[in-house]
Image: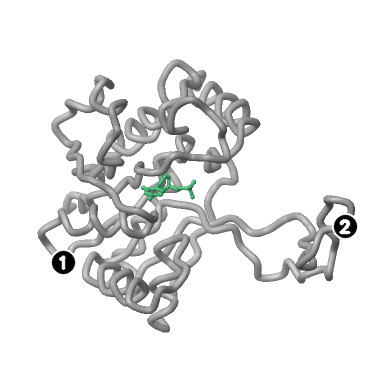
Amino acid sequence: MPLPSQYSVVVPAAGIGERMKADCPKQYLHIAGKTIIEHTLTNLLEHSQVKHVIVVLDPNDNFFSELAIASHPSIKVVEGGQERCDSVLAGLNYLPDDEEWVLVHDAARPCLAKTDLTTLLQLAEQGSIGGILATPVRDTMKRAIDVKMNGQHVIKQTESREKLWHALTPQFFKLASLKKALNEASKQNANITDEASAIELLGEKVMLVEGRASNIKITQPEDLLLAEFYLTQKQAK
Ligand code: C5P
């Protein structure tokens, strides 16, 4: 049996996380005994199909170098940019082989399950342009009108949740396709909030790989407790 292929991961971690209202960027908050970014990187590095992790940091970041994981031999640090997509491109540009497939995973998602990552990686052998982990929308979806009433948002209409998915990370594409897509999106000034959006702009078909809803992105203070719960459950197994 040939050994399974190994891949590099770009981890954008150059954001401030304003919505968290914390004293430090959210990826440096502690939960379940470690910082969020250490959980995220440990999850990735423990997977047998991950060979390198490129961590993309704010040029003025003084936190990462203080962490023990910073000296891990499979971690390389590069400087990020203004927007998330600029940071991702900076990470991708560090990688030498355009024919390789690459993963992009948010630093703020510390609860990724190993089995979900394994399933996503199988896309490299399935003849698609690539894909993303995602979960189907379960709640009823409302669109709000443009103006607030008494300081509150107001419903304009109910949107069908049929065929709606939450886009998670990791997202997994061939390096050449992803670089081309992100450069093109940047030229068009398109609003890119994940890698798949850039590939979609090229008219390509991106696969949705159903993953666990526990793979949350820590955004607001209440997410910390939920992530702590998932991480302690995992540690207890
Ligand atoms: O802000 P948001 O939660 O959408 O950010 C998603 C990820 O992108 C985070 O891990 C954040 O650190 C990263 N990011 C980045 N460079 C930016 C903005 C966000 O690497 N300029």
Q: Position of residue 158 (x, y in %)?
A: 82, 68
Q: Residue at x 37, y 74 (%)?
A: 185
Labels 2 and 1 touching (C-beta < 8 A): no
Asked if residue 99 lies left or right of residue 120, the reply is left
Look at mark 1 in the image and give the residue it sits on. 98
- Would you identify the image quadrant in which residue 165 lies? bottom right
Residue 25 x %, y %: 43, 33
C-alpha span from label 2 to label 1: 51 Å
Residue name at image x 60 percent, y 37 percent? 220
Quadrant assignment, res 139: bottom right
Q: Secondary structure at mark 1?
A: loop
Does residue 159 sit above or below 149 in this rendering? Answer: below
Residue 91 appears at what percent x and percent y? 24, 52
**Where does the image place residue 119, in percent across and percent down from the top left?**
41, 53
Marker disc for residue 177: none
Residue farthest to the left, as pictured: 96
Q: Residues within 10 Å of mark 1 (few under 14, many from 20)?
A: some
**First reached walking from the N terminus: tag 2 or tag 1:** 1
Residue flagged by tag 2: what amino acid is it? Answer: Met
Residue positioned 79% across, 64% down in the render: 147
At label 1, the amino acid type is Asp
Mark 2, secondary structure of its residue: loop
Q: Name the side, left or right, on which 185 lies relative to 216.
A: left
Q: Quadrant of residue 125?
A: bottom left
Residue behind mark 2: 149
In this view, which residue lies farthest toward the right?
150
